[in-house]
Amino acid sequence: MSSTNSNSTTLSLARSARAARPIQLLAKNKAASFRSAVWSHYRKNGRHDLPWRETKDPYKILVSEVMLQQTQVRRVRPFYLNFLESFPNVTALAEAPLSEVLRKWQGLGYNRRAKMLHQAAKTVVSKYGGIFPREVEKLETLPGIGPYTARALATFAFTAEEVFIETNIRTAILQHFFARSVRKISDKQILEVLEKVAPKGKAREWNYALMDYGAHLKESGIKLNAKSTHYAKQSKFAGSNREARGAVLKELTKSPQTTARLLGLLGDDRTSQLQAALTALLSEELIQKRGRVFTLPR
């Protein structure tokens, strides 16, 4: 073998070793210090008073998980409590008209979440007799529930030993194990680390602690999620399609409205955007058209 090929092979192997290094070193020194940092923060500054952490009711935990998708904790708390006052259990939510669910959701944004939560409740009642399945595979078949939500629900409601990723957990792992990496890190790599650092038999508290620690890092100014291959920057709300959709739904919670009224909600320069929003909301069955007016679905 030529010296050039030998040097190239050595360089390649060195790069591979560096890429694998965070995983290899975990058992020796990183895992213990990481767990210590996470538990220490949780004991002193954990968000132990969050209402959804005081229950193991899978319905209440599902409500919180859906609300927390792309919405900050401080905004979710009052909506969560008010929502449960109106729909205290899965049967109550399943039997409620979607229009009432959407009204209670107003102000939280991403209204499609409300519809999917409503559909999930109806499925739990019709298919499982109002009893949530405990298996991740069955939870994933419920409308709007993906791999993360299914595993979070299994962990927090049924104390299953699952690992999963959400934005704060991702930040915690990126900071401690990949902060110096020049390459973007995949969730597969993050899951490998999570598998190795997770303490046995403590999945529920450990994942709460991870979330709180990651949130603390973000509040301290550490912003590392852009290093993830799964990172997507959220667009600004002002001027967005989300704003247009929200304006339509907010108006329809008051009363049925004509096309002209809805198209003029945000000014003449945004009528085409509002028309697109009406079309999309109709196709998603979040609104209905009855004669000459639009309404919320019954």
Image (cartoon, grey):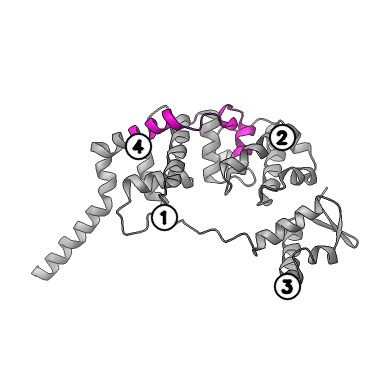
Q: Pointers 3 and 1 in contact (CB under 8 A)?
A: no
- Cα–Cα span, label 4 and label 3: 53 Å
Q: Is residue 149 left or right of residue 122?
A: left
Rounded to the nearest angstrom, the CA distance separating label 4 from label 1 is: 19 Å
Magenta residues, dominant SS class? helix
> Which region of the structure is painted magenta?
35-64
Look at 37% across and 39% down and name the residue there.
Answer: 195
Around disc 3, counting alpha carbons within 10 Å, would you say few (fewer than 14), some (14 to 19), or many (20 or more)? few
* Amino acid bearing label 4: Val
What amino acid type is highlighted by mark number 1? Ser
Residue lying at the far front in this picture: please name it.
220
Q: Earlier in the sequence, mark 4 or mark 3?
A: 4
Q: Which marked residue is nearer to the observer: mark 3 or mark 1?
A: 3
Q: Which residue is mark 4?
A: 197
Q: Viewer-nearest of labels 4 and 2? A: 4
Which numbered disc, 4 or 2, marks the residue that appears first in the sequence? 2
How many angstroms separate mark 2 from mark 3 (CA)?
A: 45 Å
Visible residue check, residue 174: yes
Helix, strand or loop under label 2: helix
Name the N-terminal-most of marks 3 and 1. 1
Is 36 magenta? The answer is yes
Q: Is residue 269 magenta?
A: no
